[in-house]
Amino acid sequence: MNGLTRVYFSWSLLAVAVVPVALGEMYTSLLNVKQAISVERRLIDYLRTYIDHELERLRDIRRFYAKVSDLHTELYKGPETAMANPLVAFTLIKRLHSEWLNVVYSNEALENAQALRSSYEEEEADLPKLEDLQGAAKGLMRLQDVYALQVASLVRGRFQKVTNGKSIDIFMPAVSVPLSGDDCFLVGKVAYEQEDYYHSVQWLEESVRLFRGTGGEWSPENEGTLGDALDHLAFSHFKTGNVSYALSLSQELLHYDPMNGRVLQNIEKYEKLLVAASPPRVSGLRRPSSKHLWTRDTYERLCQTQGSQPMHFKNPRLFCDYFTNDNPWLLLLPVKREVLSLQPYVVLYHNFITDAEAEDVKRLAQPGLRRSVVAAGEKQATADYRISKSAWLKDSAHSVVGKLDQRISMLTGLNVKHPYGEYLQVVNYGIGGHYEPHFDHATSPSSPVFKLKTGNRVATFMIYLSSVEAGGSTAFIYANFSAPVVEKAAIFWWNLHRNGQGDVDTLHAGCPVLIGDKWVANKWIHEYGQEFQHRCSLNPEE
C-alpha cells in the first residue's frame, strides 16, 4: 500500500438519528426523489385547471370580439343610418363606456394566475430547494468522473464511455430522457460557481450547442439563455487558458447584447492578451487533481469494473460452499457462502433475506430517514463524500429486525445484541449516491463509536435490500477488488485484527449508484461481548 488516503469513518449515536430534517436534502435519497413525482402530478392538475379557466376567459373575449366585429361588418356599414336608431346609439355608448372597460381591466386573468400561484405555494414545502438542484448536478458530474462518461452521450440520454476511440454503452437504461440546453446550462453553472472550469466547459459547450440548435429562442420555463451560456462558457475557456476561443464566444455574445459593457471590456482584455508577446498557452482541459482522495484512481477503476475482476477471482483459495457454522438451526437449511477475499476476510451470503423482509425493513425505516452523517471530531456532520439518508431500527421496532439479528448471530457466531451490536442502520442512496473510501472501525480514541463503551467495531455485516441496474459496488481499495450489489445477499468482513488493531485492508467505498435505487442495512458488531465467540490470538501480531 503506497501512500495514505483521506479516511472517513461512518458512525452515529446508536439510536434513531436526531439529525433535524434540513432544507435541500431531497437529492440525498432516491425515495424522496420518487415522492416528488406525486408533487409534480398535483402541479400538473393545478396547471390544467388554470389552462381551463384561461381558455374559458379567452372564449369570452373571443365572443366579445366576434360580436363587435360583426356589428362593424354589418350594422355600421352606414353609420348615419345606424345611429339614427336610438337603440343602436345607446348600445354603442354603453359598450364603449363599460363593456370595453370590463374586458380590458378584467381581474379574471389575475385571479386565475393567483389561484395557480396559491396552489403552487401549498406544495412549496415538498418542492426541491436550490441545494437539491446543486446536489443533483454534482451527482451527474460525479457519475461522469467515476465512470468516465461522455458528457455528449449523457445529454442524449446515453451512458457511454470512449474505449479505443469508440463510444461504448456502459448500460442501456430502460427509461431515459435527453437533456435540454437549459438543463446543461444549470449543470455547467453549478460547476462554474465552484470555479470548476473542467466541468463547466464541457457542460456549457453542450448547452451552447443545444441553444444554437433552437435558434436561440427562449422558453418561459428556462432559467438560462444562449447569451447566458455563451457568457459563462467564454469566461470558463479564459480560465483554462483558451483566450482565442473566449474572444470568439464573447464576440458572438456581443451580437445578442451589443451594449453589454462588461463583455466589451472582456473583448478588449482578450485582444490585448492575444497580441502580447507571450499570450497564455492553451493547456487543454485537465481534470483537477484531488487534494483529499489519494486513492482516487484505484477507487474509480474498481467502481468501473462493477465487481468484474477475473484475475482476483482466479485465486484457487477462494471458494463457494453451503455454510452452517456448526449451528444446529442451519444444518437443515445451510446458507450459500461465497468467499470473496482472504485478506481481508470478506464473504458473501446469498439469499440472506427474503423479499418480504427487505420490504418490511425499508417500510419501517422510511419515517426515520435523515441525511447520513460522518464523524467530524467528536461531533457529527453531513458531507459531500457521503450522499445518502439513513435510519436506525431497534430490535423492538418489529419482529423482522429481531429475526435478522438472530440470523446474523447464527452465521457469524457473534453476540449482536445491543450494546455489543449497534442498532440496524438502514440506508437509501441518492442521485449518484456514494460513500468515498473510509473505515468502518474507529481510527481515533475520541471517536463517538466508543460511547457505547463496548470497544471498537470488530465486524461489519451489510445486507442488500434491493438490486441496482448499474453501479453501487462496494470497492475494497487496498485489497484491489469490488463486490457488486447482489439483491437479498449480505456481505461480511472483519474490521479488526485479532489483536484489536484496525485492518487497513478494509478501507472500502460505496461506489456511486449509476442506475437504480440502492438500499442496504448495516449491522456493526463491537469487540466486547465476543470474548468467547471471537477469541484473541496468542500471537500479538495477528
Image: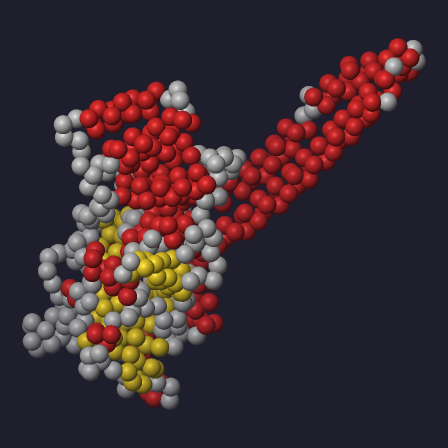
Quadrant location of the N terminus? bottom left
In the picture, measured across the screen, residue 528 lies left or right of residue 170, that is left
In the picture, measured across the screen, residue 237 lies left or right of residue 226, that is left
Between 267 and 298, which is closer to the camera in this rendering? Answer: 267
Question: Is residue 16 in view?
Answer: no
Above or below residue 256? Residue 390 is below
Between 532 and 76, which is closer to the camera in this rendering? Answer: 76
Picture quadrant of residue 265 = top left
Above or below residue 299? Residue 379 is above
Picture quadrant of residue 234 = top left
Residue in the picture at 83% in, 22% down = 73
Give the number of marks.
Answer: 0
Question: Could you tell me residue 98's position as x and y percent?
Answer: 77, 17
In the picture, measured across the screen, residue 541 lies left or right of residue 137, that is left
Between 496 and 165, which is closer to the camera in this rendering? Answer: 165
Residue in the picture at 19% in, 26% down = 275
Residue in the picture at 36% in, 65% down = 521
Above or below residue 494? Residue 124 is above
Colour convention of the picture:
secondary structure
Above or below residue 50? Residue 395 is below
Question: Could you tell me residue 327's position as x and y percent?
Answer: 30, 85
Quadrant location of the C terminus? bottom left
Question: Could you tell me residue 166's position as x and y percent?
Answer: 32, 59
Name the residue furthest bottom. 332
Between 218 and 33, which is closer to the camera in this rendering? Answer: 218
In the picture, measured across the screen, residue 310 lies left or right of residue 27, that is left
Question: Could you tell me residue 36's position as x and y percent?
Answer: 50, 50
Residue in the picture at 24% in, 61% down = 301
Question: Is residue 40 in view?
Answer: yes
